[in-house]
Image (tube, rainbow, N blue to C red):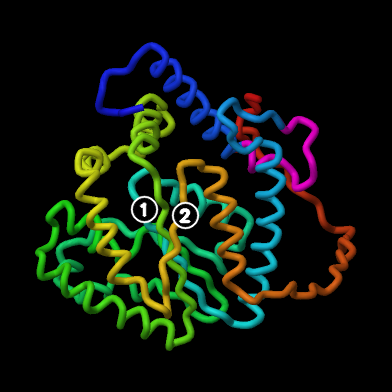
Amino acid sequence: MNPSSPLSNAEREELIAKLEQDLLDGYDEEFELEIEDEDHPNAPDGRHKDGALARGAYFRELFRLQRELVKLQDWVVQERRKAVIIFEGRDSAGKGGVIKRITQRLNPRVARVVALPAPNDRERTQWYFQRYVPHLPAAGEIVLFDRSWYNRAGVESVMGFCSAEDVEEFFRSVPEFERMLVRSGIQLIKYWFSISDEEQHLRFLSRIHDPLKQWKLSPMDLESRSRWEDYTRAKEVMLERTHIAEAPWWVVPADDKKRARLNCIAHLLGQFPFEEVPRPEVQLPERVRHEDYSRHPVPENMLVPPRY
């Protein structure tokens, strides 16, 4: 299906079916928060017509991987490790979705997400990496960058927000900057989420027609759609010039959202030699009661109305 050419009736029906499936995937994001780790009696387990991963099987594997992520978190804290995980990719490639699944059941004091806005006037005059440095991890922390200093090689370069000299200086500096991070004890892992032209077209349409997702579409996103080939060239140069032994790039095929999430999380877990940290047995203490204690009733005008 070519997004730029008129659609036949069959292609239109196929597109509508895919949009409906994408909408279901969005609802699944909330469904995941409710299902227990064990098999859920109401979990749908059918296989999609296009052969996509069965939803029930996806949930079971996701929860298994999330249990492993909790073990990784405990190990990072005990061993006082420092980790930075970078997520890059085109708009709508699924970076936010996998970050959400990684952090969903983790302690936000251990695993935190950094998603910086566009630099302000003062930040634009700083050393380029300066505004990222305060967000780097201390011992026992994992930091996930939802976009990172690689903005310079991507959106800033393509959209003309910096000069060609700025981009060239970035490519000279970033390998040394990352080697410094690694020498300081930070484990740096970099993911590029790769989607096809057709898949991005579909996801943008889904955002346009879903009121819950329309906020995700910025004017910059729409402009990036018309500059697909420019972004492709920028990505290829970026991967070539910043793929270093100390911090290599890992490319995640992401046209299938669910498989991309599972594959990325499984790969991430494999980057650490973690072991399960024994937890001490927890004993719930007895509730201490005092005869002179009485609980005051909450005034009616302070209660949230029971509408449901």
Judging depth in this view, the residue of 105 and 251 nearest the camera is: 251
Q: Are marks 1 and 2 in contact (CB under 8 Å)?
A: yes
Residue 116 placement, left or right of 59: left
The answer to whether residue 134 is above or below residue 93 is below
The answer to whether residue 303 is above or below residue 95 is above
Place of residue 279 in the rendered image (x, y in percent of width and height, measured from the top left): 79, 72
Residue 240 placement, left or right of 273: left
Q: Nearer the viewer, mark 1 or mark 2?
A: 2
Question: Sequence-wise, which precedes: disc 1 or disc 2?
Answer: 1
On the image, which quarter does residue 195 sit in?
Answer: top left
Judging depth in this view, the residue of 206 and 172 nearest the camera is: 172
Place of residue 296 in the rendered image (x, y in percent of width and height, measured from the top left): 73, 47
On the image, which quarter does residue 141 sit in?
Answer: bottom right
- Quadrant for the C terminus in the image: top right
Q: Residue tagged by mark 1?
A: 89
Q: Amino acid at mark 2?
A: Val
Decide whether residue 34 is among the magenta residues: yes
As measured in the structure, the alpha-carbon distance from the residue carrying label 1 to the one carrying label 2 is: 9 Å
Judging depth in this view, the residue of 58 and 283 nearest the camera is: 58
Q: Residue tagged by mark 2?
A: 252
Place of residue 121 in the rendered image (x, y in percent of width and height, measured from the top left): 15, 63
Place of residue 250 in the rendered image (x, y in percent of width and height, measured from the top left): 45, 63
- Give the residue at x 66% y 30%: 47
- Magenta segment boundaries in residue numbering: 31-44
Q: How packed is label 2: few (under 14 Cα within 10 Å), some, or many (20 or more)?
A: some
Residue 215 placement, left or right of 267: left
Q: Residue furthest bottom?
A: 183
Q: Secondary structure at mark 2?
A: strand
- Give the residue at x 40% y 29%: 206
- Give the residue at x 30% y 83%: 176
Residue 162 placement, left or right of 263: left
